[in-house]
Image (tube, helix red, strand yellow):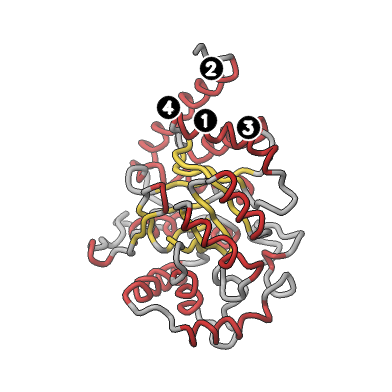
Amino acid sequence: MTPNSNERTRREFLKTAAAASSATVLASAASPILGAKKSGKSPTIKPADAIPKRVLGKTGMKVSVLSFGGGSQFLKNKDGAWEPLLQRAVDLGINYFDTHQNYKTEERFGEILPKYRKKIYIVTKFDPRDEDGMMKSFEGSLKRLKVDYVDALLLHNLGKEDDLKAFAKGAWKRMQKLKSEGTARFIGFSSMRSAAASRNFIEQLNPDIALVAMNATRYAGFAKLTLKPAVKNNVGVIAMKTVRGLIGQKGATPKKLLQYVLDQKGVASAVVGHYGMKVLEENVKLVKEIIQSRKMSPAAKKRLETACAPLAGPHALPWARADYLDDGISYA
């Protein structure tokens, strides 16, 4: 089939992005990371000490049980601090890195991650529901990330108002084409608004990946409504919003909150945004302990749910507010 002019334009764009990516990777490899020690080296992590990995559903990707979120918490790290933090995440064995153009961190990922392309997964998201808008967003993301493909491309923030029929005929159809071409290896969606819409997306469109809000408050019923169909369809599940706004509640320690979601059948990883090296190091330590320990008992799980239940809503969870901006400032 002869490609049309739009396809030729997009392919030419991808070739240009790939060339720019290669040049940037070479330059970054020759330059020291801001804020790093003079040696320019991070401590070597032995394989035995690496973060455990799980298979992300039908993708076959073996992802670290702790993923790196490029949202507001990461954005709060100032210049000179985020560079060694991102580098350290790679050194510690985190291999799934999630971002979105609105987070304003795709450029950060593009400065550090491309040179590790063969050992990590880079994921981004888009907001436009129409095909043309989606493509424009995606092409901008590739340029900022300095890569010629992403490991996963996700529709951002699926809500109950989204028309799946219209989406399936437009943006989703184009996403499937991007997957067949290899510019987006896997496709899916993210949601922190509607568990019912997420369930419908899984059952009707059979995505590769579902990034959904899931925590001990049982907010919006994501675990109840989405995990069963996800497991049935072998959809890889990444849990988000697992700890934010909950730490400090009676019995709600970071370890318990992370274990709560990682114990859920079908959950491959928990994505967390890290503000500061200490938090990153501690979370890596915690997930290693969690995977090596026994699962949380039903009684302990119930106690944690009871303690966190009063927080299940926008009154306590900033990300659940209708006007929430993941900009690292509004709800710091």
Residue under label 3: 136
Q: Nearer the viewer, residue 98 or 165?
A: 165
**Whole-percent x, y for residue 302 in the image:** 54, 84
Mark 4 neighbour class, 10 Å CA radius: few under 14, some 14 to 19, many 20 or more: some
The mark that comes first in sequence, 1 or 2, is: 2
| Tag 4–tag 1 contact (CB < 8 Å) | no
Q: Which numbered disc covers residue 177?
A: 1
Q: Is residue 207 left or right of residue 129?
A: left
The structure residue drawn at horizontal position 53% and vertical position 46%, both measured from the top left corner, is 206
The mark that comes first in sequence, 4 or 2, is: 2
**Whole-percent x, y for residue 109 in the image:** 48, 47
Q: CA distance from mark 3 to mark 2?
A: 15 Å
Q: Which numbered disc covers residue 19?
A: 4
Residue under label 2: 8
Amino acid under disc 2: Arg
Q: Nearer the viewer, residue 123 or 191?
A: 191
**Whole-percent x, y for residue 141 in the image:** 55, 39
In which quadrant will I find the C terminus?
bottom right
Mark 3 neighbour class, 10 Å CA radius: few under 14, some 14 to 19, many 20 or more: few
Mark 2 neighbour class, 10 Å CA radius: few under 14, some 14 to 19, many 20 or more: few
User: Can I make out residue 253 in this image?
Assistant: yes
Q: CA distance from mark 3 to mark 4?
A: 19 Å
Picture quadrant where residue 43 is located = bottom left
| Tag 3–tag 4 contact (CB < 8 Å) | no
Q: CA distance from mark 4 to mark 2?
A: 17 Å
The structure residue drawn at horizontal position 35% and vertical position 45%, both measured from the top left corner, is 116
